[in-house]
Image (cartoon, rainbow, N blue to C red):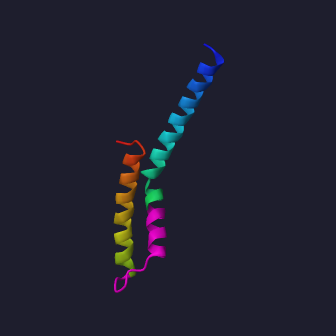
Amino acid sequence: MDIKKMLLSMAEQQADSVKSEMLSWIQSDDFEEELAEKMDKAVNIPFVKDEREKEFFRGVADLITDIVYGLAGGK
């Protein structure tokens, strides 16, 4: 095996590993919760109680993470 093929193989293995870790992180409850909290802090929905906003943004975060997971190559 020549050096170019060896380096390409190593790079592909590393890229696959990073992709796998990224997809796991996107689907994690921690990421979803953090995303929901950031949206909740950034947006105030008039006439809606904070608890209802939190539930709403958690649902939106779940939807977003599912979409991003699919776009990033998840199933």
**Residue placed furthest toward the right:** 3
Name the residue: 44% across, 76% down.
Answer: 43
> Percent x, y for residue 15?
54, 36
Q: Is residue 36 above or below residue 27?
A: below
> Percent x, y for residue 1?
60, 13
Would you identify the image quadrant in which residue 60 lies?
Answer: bottom left
**Residue placed furthest toward the top:** 1
Q: Nearer the viewer, residue 51 or 36?
A: 36
Q: How many marks?
A: 0
> Percent x, y for residue 34?
48, 63
Name the residue: 48% across, 40% down.
Answer: 20
> Percent x, y for residue 19?
49, 40
**Residue placed furthest toward the bottom:** 47
Name the residue: 63% across, 15% down.
Answer: 2
Q: Is residue 55 left or right of residue 17?
A: left
Q: Is residue 13 above or below residue 53?
A: above
Q: Is residue 37 magenta?
A: yes
Q: Is residue 20 left or right of residue 7?
A: left
User: Quarter of the image containing the C terminus?
Assistant: top left
Specify start and end residues of the magenta stretch as a single range: 33-49
Q: Is residue 2 magenta?
A: no
Would you identify the image quadrant in which residue 11 lies?
Answer: top right
**Residue placed furthest toward the front:** 4
Name the residue: 53% across, 40% down.
Answer: 18
Q: Is residue 41 left or right of residue 11?
A: left
